[in-house]
């Protein structure tokens, strides 16, 4: 066995594996390489990043609306990090299936989990299981071309309810209400375009429990709603209630002030009658209490009207309202999934940890195991929070160096040999370049004239996992 003091040198780098190649995982790897200890030459690291999907970028590729204006910038930044060549990427490798915790600990001194949160948070109200009731995260996966979800999505509702006042709820509502032709400039797959093109939707309603000053949107996302062609935004004067906490938030928080001003201006300026073929309604002070249905199918939704209590929180008024809808999308947050052999907090949907150090069942740190991103802190915060979160975890790793367990087989070729021996067809960074080029070529070759449209497409996303693996030139198994 190699002594701990020998690690971190050119002959024996500190071997680190990051499980998850979304922003959290890439930031953790990047920050470790840029730490003062590494930059000064006092520590040499060798980092591998694994992901269950054949392509990198995680939730940025599979969890953000394709017309989001910041996608290209975020992916570009992550791409630059992995393009440097000092961090290896292994795609199409599923932790808990292809590799166990024992495998990782055998080949790496440090394991950092950055698996994020991809499931929908539960909403336990009557009727939530009716046909036509969906999770917003599942819908996002569909329109983002996730390789492990169905190619089909039932888009047969004229009136739709979206529950939630966060950015994901706005993404879901915007995609549902937007005309499919206007999404063709994005990378949406052809099956998504066809599904949205055939949608008969006329009205999408977004509901929040509290008032306009308590929304969790960002100004950029909110303004994006007004850019949809032939879609009117409808607001309701009775929803514009402000308590003392609201007034304070507006005075002290520029973001809240900006969004309230935007909403108020829309309310004042909206025409008496909508002239668009589609409408996007924003409702506040509505708490969902039951999804209504007949014959097992959604026919409506019931809310209790709420009021602000002075602290910015909402309480019920005893007044109930019903809306006829044929589909309900809950977008009240994401929820993390348990990882094999790692303690999990089922109530919060996170790996049990303290500042990024993974804890065991007795609450003690497990040497060499760490977490970052949403699987560490829960699905809250934006990209800036993810960077700070990764820095906290990396700092813990560096503080713990002397007490880390020593990997038994740390050679870089050992892990590739294990994957190949087990028949795992893993993809590489070079493979991503091939897939990236292929998707851009699909965009260049897209015949918009055949649809009577004048537009150009930068890329078209490949959906099939098998196709992605083949295009990426996955490393074939030796068995």
Image (spheres, rainbow, N blue to C red):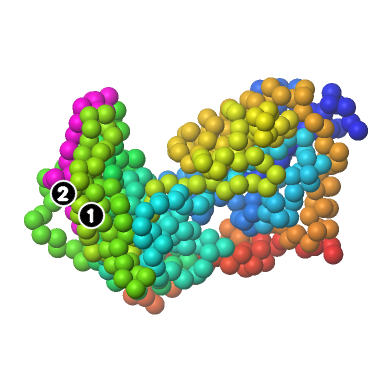
Residue at the limit of the structure toward the left, as seen here: 272
Which residue is rendered at x = 78% and y = 44% of the image? Answer: 102
In the image: residue 290, left or right of residue 7: left
Q: What x and y, as percent, mark residue 422?
A: 80, 59
Q: Magenta segment: does it hold 251?
A: yes
Identify the element where label 1 is drawn.
strand
Residue at the limit of the structure toward the right, as seen here: 1
Q: What x and y, as percent, mark residue 32?
A: 66, 31
Give the residue number, with chain letter if any, for mark 1: 281
Above or below, 397 against 127 in this view is: above
Span shown in magenta: 232-252
Q: What x and y, as percent, mark residue 445?
A: 49, 70
Q: What x and y, as percent, mark residue 276?
A: 18, 63
In depth, the one of 116 and 351 nearer the eye is 351
Q: Magenta segment: does it hold 80?
A: no
Above or below, 110 against 401 in this view is: below
Which residue is rendered at x = 22% and y = 36% of the image? Answer: 308
Which residue is rendered at x = 28% and y = 44% of the image? Answer: 209
Q: Residues within 10 Å of mark 1 (few under 14, many from 20)?
A: some
Q: CA distance from mark 2 to mark 1?
A: 9 Å
Mark 2 and mark 1 in contact? Answer it, CB < 8 Å. Answer: yes
Residue at the limit of the structure toward the bottom, as seen here: 450
In the image: residue 44, left or right of residue 383: right
Give the residue number, with chain letter if any, for mark 2: 236
In the image: residue 465, left or right of residue 428: left
Q: Residues within 10 Å of mark 2 (few under 14, many from 20)?
A: few
Which residue is rendered at x = 69% and y = 22% of the image? Answer: 399
In depth, the one of 185 and 351 nearer the eye is 351
Name the image quarter holding the C terminus: bottom right
Residue 176 shows up from this direction = no
């Amino acid at each position: 066995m190699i002594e701990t003091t020998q690690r971190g040198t050119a002959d024996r780098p500190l071997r680190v594996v990051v499980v998850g190649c979304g922003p959290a995982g890439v930031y953790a790897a990047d920050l470790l390489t840029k730490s003062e200890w590494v930059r000064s030459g006092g520590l040499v690291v060798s980092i591998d990043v694994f992901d269950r999907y054949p392509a990198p970028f995680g939730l940025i590729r599979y969890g953000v609306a394709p017309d989001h204006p910041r996608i290209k910038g975020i992916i570009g930044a992550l791409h630059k990090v992995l393009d440097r060549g000092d961090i290896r990427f292994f795609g199409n490798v599923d932790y808990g299936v292809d590799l166990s915790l024992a495998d990782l600990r055998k080949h790496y001194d440090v394991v950092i989990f950055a698996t994020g949160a991809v499931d929908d948070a539960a909403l336990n109200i009557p009727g939530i299981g009716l046909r036509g009731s969906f999770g917003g995260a599942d819908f996002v996966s569909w329109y983002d071309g996730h390789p492990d979800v169905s190619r089909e999505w039932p888009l047969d509702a004229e009136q739709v309810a979206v529950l939630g006042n966060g950015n994901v709820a706005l993404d879901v509502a915007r995609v549902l209400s937007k005309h499919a032709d206007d999404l063709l400039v994005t990378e949406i797959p052809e099956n998504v375009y066809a599904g949205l093109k055939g949608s008969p939707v006329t009205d999408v309603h977004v509901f929040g429990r509290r008032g306009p000053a308590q929304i969790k949107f960002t100004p950029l996302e909110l303004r994006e709603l007004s850019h949809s062609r032939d879609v009117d935004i409808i607001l309701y004067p009775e929803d514009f209630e402000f308590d003392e906490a609201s007034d304070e938030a507006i005075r002290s928080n520029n973001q809240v002030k900006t969004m309230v001003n935007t909403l108020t201006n829309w309310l004042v300026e909206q025409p008496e009658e909508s002239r668009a073929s589609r409408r996007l309604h924003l409702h506040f002070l509505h708490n969902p209490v039951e999804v209504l249905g007949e014959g097992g199918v959604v026919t409506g939704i019931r809310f209790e009207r709420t009021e602000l209590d002075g602290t910015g929180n909402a309480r019920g008024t005893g007044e109930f309202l019903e809306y006829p809808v044929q589909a309900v999308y809950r977008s009240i947050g994401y929820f993390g999934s348990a990882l094999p052999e790692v303690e999990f907090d089922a109530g919060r949907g996170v790996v049990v940890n303290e500042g990024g150090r993974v804890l065991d069942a007795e609450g003690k740190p497990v040497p060499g195991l760490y977490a970052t991103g949403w699987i560490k802190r829960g699905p809250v915060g934006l990209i800036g929070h993810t960077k700070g979160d990764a820095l906290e975890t990396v700092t813990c790793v560096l503080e713990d160096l002397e007490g880390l367990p020593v990997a038994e087989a740390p050679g870089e070729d050992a892990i590739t040999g294990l994957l190949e021996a087990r028949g795992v067809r893993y993809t590489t960074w070079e493979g991503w370049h091939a897939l990236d080029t292929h998707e851009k070529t699909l965009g260049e070759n897209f015949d918009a004239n055949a649809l009577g449209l004048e537009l150009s497409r930068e890329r078209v996303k490949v959906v099939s996992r098998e196709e992605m693996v083949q295009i990426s030139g996955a490393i074939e198994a030796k068995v």
